[in-house]
Amino acid sequence: MVPTIDAATWNLSIKGLVNNPVVINYHEIKNMNAVEEFATLACISNKIGGNFTSTALWKGVRLKDLLQKAVVKPNAKYIVFRCQDGYDVGIPLESGMMEGTILAYDMNNSPLTNEHGYPIRAIVPGFYGMMNPKWITEIELVDKTYEGFWQRKGWTNNGISSISSSIVIPGNQPIGDRFPHLVGDNSNLAAGRNIPIAGIAFAGNRGISKVEVSIDGGKSWKTAIIKDPLSQYTWVLWTSGFTAADKGNYEIVVRATDKNGQIQTSTLEDPFPNGAEGYSKINISVT
């Protein structure tokens, strides 16, 4: 159930391995130096071509600024978030100290809705959505690795290691729901016509260096055009296309390479426990 929190009476406590425990309210947080950043969130249970991922503009305060107020002790290793709905999760201290890790109170230039974590949620680039908790009420610094709600059920406690890419057009994969104005007319797949291909690619906070598209099931590849991402923490949009010389069936496949030089694997893996892996593929019939 989505909690309903009154920001006027809400406060955030920072405790544990700190020299100066902090209790801060919503008004005080909003009076701190604010930052804005675009970041993509992806659910670890998202399937290949799935729509459990999206990008937004977030505004809030850097978590490290609050931790500096609390004066973290040298033996602290993990940051534990506890939330109004009973949820808990932990991230490594170094991840909490990243420039991009923020406690957000606005999303897309408006205050967070209850569903998105009002009054405060965490945005932690490089981690799946489950590590970006909502409705936070308490932060505790501890001296060992912390396993949160989903980790105690077997899901990974690590950041995003996989690379994902999805085809938005042509086809009707669920990710198309995120781009209602982009989805093309699948009935206009005719020989001799240019058939556009477009989609997204994401590798956590590592970025994407290359996207390749195949129209023959992966036998040959063509480098796609990548649009500059909104930030280092977001997916990229890519475009390609081809002119079908002959009628018939075509298998379109996409793969991406991150900025560390890692190439997306073709080996299919289910979302549990580390996130889905494998190529996004669609079959089209050209008439």
Image (cartoon, rainbow, N blue to C red):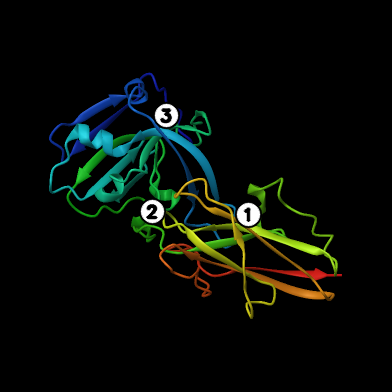
Residue topped by disc 2: 150
The 10 Å Cα crowd at callout 1, few under 14, some 14 to 19, many 20 or more, is many
**Discs 3, 1 touching: Cβ within 8 Å:** no
Q: Residue at x 48, y 70 (%)?
A: 263
Mark 1 falls on what kind of element?
helix
Indicate the amino acid at tag 3. Answer: Pro
Mark 3 falls on what kind of element?
loop
**Which comes before the other along the chain, label 1 or label 2?**
2
User: Taking the image as drawn, is residue 84 in sight?
Assistant: no
Determine the image quadrant of residue 281: bottom right
Residue topped by disc 1: 175
Disc 3/disc 1 C-alpha distance (Å): 28 Å
Q: Is residue 203 above or below residue 279?
A: above
Between circles 1 and 2, the one closer to the viewer is 1
**Discs 1, 2 touching: Cβ within 8 Å:** no
Q: Residue at x 51, y 75 (%)?
A: 267
Determine the image quadrant of residue 273: bottom left
**Which residue occupies the foreground of this view, 214 or 101?**
214
Q: Is residue 226 left or right of residue 44?
A: right
Indicate the amino acid at tag 1. Answer: Ile
The 10 Å Cα crowd at callout 3, few under 14, some 14 to 19, many 20 or more, is many
User: Taking the image as drawn, is residue 264 in sight?
Assistant: yes
**Which comes before the other along the chain, label 3 or label 1?**
3
- Residue 24 location (% of width, % of height): 28, 25
What label sits on residue 119 in the rendered view?
3
Q: Residue at x 71, y 49 (%)?
A: 182
Mark 2 falls on what kind of element?
loop
Q: Residue at x 32, y 22 (%)?
A: 28
Indicate the amino acid at tag 2. Answer: Trp
Disc 2/disc 3 C-alpha distance (Å): 23 Å
**Which residue occupies the foreground of this view, 38 or 114?**
38
